[in-house]
Amino acid sequence: MDLKGRSFLTLLDFSKEEIKYLLTLSETLKDQKRKGIAHRYLENKNVVLLFQKDSTRTRCAFEAGAYDLGMGVTYLGPSGSQMGKKESIKDTARVLGRMYEGIQFRGYKHDDVESLSEHAGVPVWNGLTDMYHPTQVLADFLTIQETFGYLEGINFTYVGDARNNMGNSLMVGAAKLGLNFTAVAPKALWPEGSLIEHCEAIASETGAKISFTEDKMEGTKGADVIYTDVWVSMGEAKEVWQQRLEQLNDYQVDRAMMENAGNTSIFMHCLPAFHGTDTEVGAQIAKEFAKKYPRVQNGEMEVTNDVIESNQSKVFEEAENRMHTIKAVMLATMHGPIN
Ligand code: CP
Ligand code: NVA
């Protein structure tokens, strides 16, 4: 499997075999890391990480991963570079492509990461756009595979804002790899019709089933995985909170939902998650909205604290797997096959 020179913008661009190859490579790199075996396959190369939005996991996964692979790293944050302000994405791509062997981009418009990839002449990796977050899905699927031993036929239920970058990307990933994907959300928050149609066409070849329901008990019954994400994503206006609470407060992942799924089910979340008042936003939303929406009174929003802290929760395994899977993406696209 040779992915050298390819960008990684959405899982739609990769076949089932290519995605499985990346997961297998991630396992190899994880094993080497655990055993302390050096794997500096990319010495003398450098990567640049462009972030228009904040990050903990994605930035650190790329940085630590690049160091492990023997590379140098430059981080450019939401302020401090010319990109987008005084210099177009296209010009930025042509400059950075001459200095670095790979570029990570986290931003708003998916078009921007496509434009970077078109003009940079080196692999570009999507570290999250408003539309997709594909490196997260690799980490999530590695975690599911480690837990259950397989991916095909897993009943995967996504609860919450199903038309955000995570809802979209998980639906694409499930369709590609043959997981049964159910989105549980008010209809207004289901993914775009054209993306659903595209995924259904993929699913008809892989055997995946894709379904949607507003009924949270029906949609979570017997699920192997219950996945949720924040109700308001980066880049959305503060004013959206009121509407999203109205739409989603009844879809909070709680103990009753996990029991409905069954005691072998796992809970997943890409993080960061709101499950207490120990964050600025969590405390503020709790204060402002507790009266009208009692579920959020303790800063618990998309998931209750008891669920995320339970033995069924895999959130920190997912977070760790960001690094192993991102290393696999960099290695496969910059180096090609390893022996
Ligand atoms: N899950 C994820 O992408 O986290 P960060 O925003 O911290 O990178
Ligand atoms: N949907 C979230 C994902 C964060 C990793 C956001 O875009 O903010």
Image (cartoon, grey):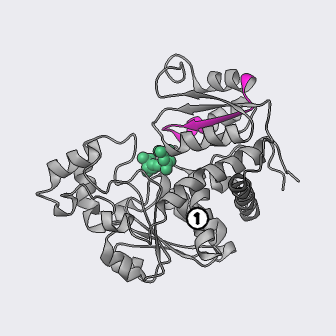
Q: Position of residue 267 (x, y in %)?
A: 44, 68
Indicate the amino acid at tag 1: Thr
Q: Nearer the viewer, residue 38 or 284?
A: 38
Residue shown at the point (53%, 54%) measured from the top left: 319
Count all numbered tags in the image, as a single digit: 1
Asked if residue 77 is positioned above or below residue 10 in the image, the reply reads: above
Residue sticking out furthest to the left = 291
Q: Quadrant of residue 249?
A: bottom left
Q: Is mark 1 within 8 Å of ligand 1?
A: no
List the single residue furthest toward the right: 339
Q: Relative to 85, is 150 on the left or the right? A: right
Q: Which residue is mark 1?
A: 143
Give the residue at x 81% y 42%: 41
Q: Is residue 199 above or below residue 71?
A: below
Q: Which quarter of the figure has residue 226? A: bottom left
Q: Position of residue 338 (x, y in %)?
A: 85, 51
Query: Is residue 108 located in the magenta-colored stretch of the structure?
Result: yes
Image side of residue 200 versus residue 287, left or right: right
Q: Is residue 201 visible?
A: no
Give the magenta range: 99-113
**Outermost residue toward the top?**
86
Q: Residue at x 31, y 70 (%)?
A: 254
Quarter of the image containing the C terminus? Answer: bottom right
Residue at the front extreme of this rendering? 36
